[in-house]
Image (spheres, grey):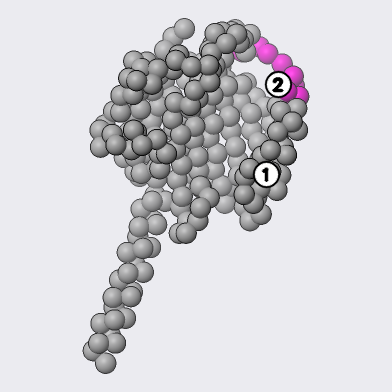
Amino acid sequence: MRKIYTKQRAILLGIFIVFVGVLNNANAETSEIVNFRFGSDVSINVPRNWYFPDKKIRQHLNEDIVHLAGVSPVQGNNQILIAANIRTRLNSTAAAAFMQLAVRKGKFMSQSKVRFSDTEKWRRVAQAQINKNLRTFLEKKKYLEGIYLATVNIEKLGNYYSVVVYKIFEYTDWMEMDRTDFIYLGNIVYILNTSYRTDEERKLKPILKKMRESLSIPAQ
């Protein structure tokens, strides 16, 4: 009887440890924040307990500020500076929230033109892009059943005006709210994508909001 009782305690303890581990991973709102700085100017804050695919970044997470001096936001024509996600459900391969910051060089609109641009025109462009890439998205993303354009706004993000495209991703068992900020600065555009499962909106939406608001871009 004592052996059975001890075995039961061990099983319960194991379940408790796993459960606490999931909660700790999901509790990103209380996680420590790490600041990622690219080159000497652009920076963004991300919770330390998120998963970073980039091995170089993972190796430096013990630092308060990760200086990625070798990753300059003007090196390439289309460059992902950082990507991260968090999983809040045990044994789930799908991320509950996601962020990615990218940069492109080229000829783009100035901030003055973005501020007073026609959102209806941007909406038509966004819808055309969805229609064009829908088949590819459906084939690439597991369990994805549809993508719908919610709205397009011109919003202030930090010191700049951003073209913000909101989309809804419909999966088999959940919905995902996706936001993409396009910050056009004439010869360069920063693209910040953030998304979260709508059934975890209360927990994840504020985290992504803080993340976006922490984005720092030098004056142009």
Residue at x 65% of width, y 36% of height? 167
Residue type at mark 1 is Glu
Residue 147 sits in quarter: top right
Say which element carries label 1. helix
Indicate the position of residue 157 as horizontal and vertical percent values.
Answer: 51, 22
Quadrant of the drawing holding the N terminus: bottom left
Residue at x 69% of width, y 43% of height? 138
Residue at x 45% of width, y 59% of height? 90
Residue at x 58% of width, y 47% of height? 198
Horizontal placement of 40 versus 139: left or right? Answer: left
Q: Residue 22 in magenta?
A: no
- Name the residue tied to disc 1: 139
Residue stretch rendered in magenta on the structure = 115-125
Q: Quick one: label 2, few (<14), some, or many (20+) residues within 10 Å? A: some
Residue type at mark 2 is Trp
Whether residue 157 can be seen here: no
Indicate the position of residue 109 as horizontal and vertical percent values.
Answer: 62, 10
Q: Mark 1 and mark 2: span between their CA atoms?
A: 26 Å
| Main SS category, magenta section | helix
Q: Residue 120 in magenta?
A: yes
Q: Nearer the viewer, residue 144 or 216?
A: 144
Horizontal placement of 218 versus 33: left or right? Answer: right
Q: Which of disc 2 and disc 1 is earlier in sequence?
A: 2
- Tag of residue 208: none
Rendered view: 218 above or below 84: above
Indicate the position of residue 47 as horizontal and vertical percent values.
Answer: 37, 39
Horizontal placement of 56 versus 189: left or right? Answer: left
Say which element carries label 2. helix
Rendered view: 77 above or below 85: above
- Tag of residue 122: 2
